[in-house]
Image (cartoon, rainbow, N blue to C red):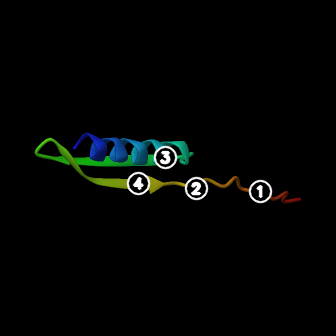
Amino acid sequence: MKQLDELKLKYIISLLENMEYGSINITVHAGEITQIDKTEKKRFTLAKVNKS
C-alpha cells in the first residue's frame, strides 16, 4: 500500500513540475486517491496590430 501511495505522489509531483498554468483535481474515495484530473492552460500573448 505504501509503495502505491508513493507512486501516486510521484505522479502528482511530475504533473506539478510540468505545468505552467492550470489545475489538478484529486478525487478521494474511502480515504484513497481514486482519480487525478489535470486541466492545463496555454496562454499566448497577442501581437498588437498598429492601426494607422
Between tags 1 and 4, which lies in front?
Answer: 4
Q: Position of residue 40 (x, y in %)?
A: 49, 54
- Work out how far the residue at label 4 is from the one at label 2, CA to CA, in angstroms: 13 Å
State the image coordinates of residue 3 (x, y, percent, origin top left): 30, 43
For badge 2, the amino acid type reads Lys
Give the CA separation, mark 3 to mark 2.
18 Å
Which label lies toward us, 3 or 2? 3
Mark nearer the N terminus (1 vs 3) = 3
Dot 3: element: helix
Q: Earlier in the sequence, mark 1 or mark 2?
A: 2
What residue did someone put label 1 on?
47
Q: Earlier in the sequence, mark 3 or mark 2?
A: 3
Which residue carries the number 4 mark? 38
Q: Residue at x 26, y 40 (%)?
A: 2
Rate crowding at label 4 as few (under 14), some (14 to 19) or many (20 or more) other CA atoms within 10 Å: some
Q: Give whichever of 49, 24 is nearer the camera.
A: 24
Frontmost of labels 4 and 3 is 3
- Which of pointers 1 and 3 indicates the residue nearer the eye? 3
Identify residue type, mark 1.
Answer: Ala
Residue annotated with mark 3: 14
Circles 1 and 3: CB distance less than 8 Å?
Answer: no
Which amino acid does the dot numbered 4 rest on?
Lys
Q: Position of residue 46 (x, y in %)?
A: 71, 56
